[in-house]
Amino acid sequence: MPAETKVDPFKPKQPQIPGVPAHPTESNSQAPRRPSTQPPGAPGSAFSFWPPSEWPVWLRIGLAAAVVVIIVGIAWRARVSSANPTAAPPAPAPVASAPPPPAKPVVRLPTGPGDIGTARELAKPWSSKPFLFYNATTQETVPALAVRLPGGSLWGISMREPYGTCQLDYVTNLGTLLSQYNFRATHPMVVNPCSGSVYDLAQYTAASNGLVRGQVVRGTAIRAPFAIEVVERGKNIVAVRME
């Protein structure tokens, strides 16, 4: 009894057709393959790299055109940016400064010998009157001061330190005398800001021509300020001569 052939339900037996091979798949697999016309690296090719020399002409032209367009775009953008620079921020508005104080009027001092003021200007004790005095001996004009002393007498002095060039000051502020010259006074004093010396016109001191006012009560001054004779003639104060 012939062996029973087992039929695979998933692979049914194909009917036999006259003139058709029984296994067309096998026969087709044995047929010679036609050479492939695809370049290496093309889709479906076994190569993963496609050299640029083998790219199609249309692809190379397209890439070159894209590069040219990018370069032209960058150059145009740079030119537009340089032609329209970013506007600088506006400068801050200048702050209005306060107007300078008005200049003090120049006071022309009277010059002696001669009238240098009025008795009314020197009516109160320790009131003073600045003036200039021409010294005929030295042929120079020096700053000077006339002071009304307690009791009504007048005294004039040169406001240039003896044998020096520093200009003296007449200080009426007692607090300034204490803070700047460390001298506690009860009335105005003449001071030398260069040496810190203090002169008291209420006290006499010896000089080459006799007694003069302006005792040195503090500091290293050599002597009292040079005296200038001033007298009262009617309503006027007159500077006569200098020591």
Image (cartoon, helix red, strand yellow):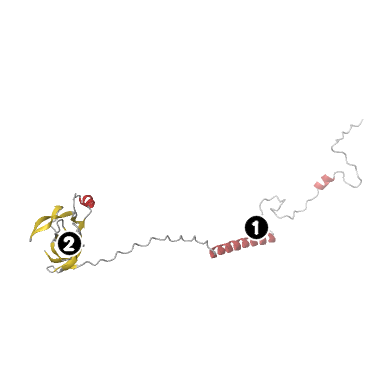
For numbered disc 2, what is the local secondary structure? strand
Q: Residue at x 83, y 46 (%)?
A: 27
The residue singled out by tag 1 in the image is: 52
Q: Is residue 63 left or right of residue 78?
A: right
Q: Nearer the viewer, residue 122 or 46?
A: 122
Q: Nearer the viewer, residue 199 or 223?
A: 199
For numbered disc 1, what is the local secondary structure? helix
Q: Amino acid type of disc 2?
A: Ala
Figure quadrant of the C terminus = bottom left
Q: Residue at x 67, y 62 (%)?
A: 61
Q: Nearer the viewer, residue 80 or 16?
A: 80
Frontmost of labels 2 and 1 is: 2
Q: Residue at x 10, y 56 (%)?
A: 205
Give the class, few, some or many, for how many residues have Cα within 10 Å of label 2's Cα (few <14, many ≥20). Answer: many
Residue 198: percent from left, percent from top: 17, 54
The residue singled out by tag 2 in the image is: 146
**Does the image show residue 159?**
no
Q: Is residue 231 left or right of residue 23?
A: left
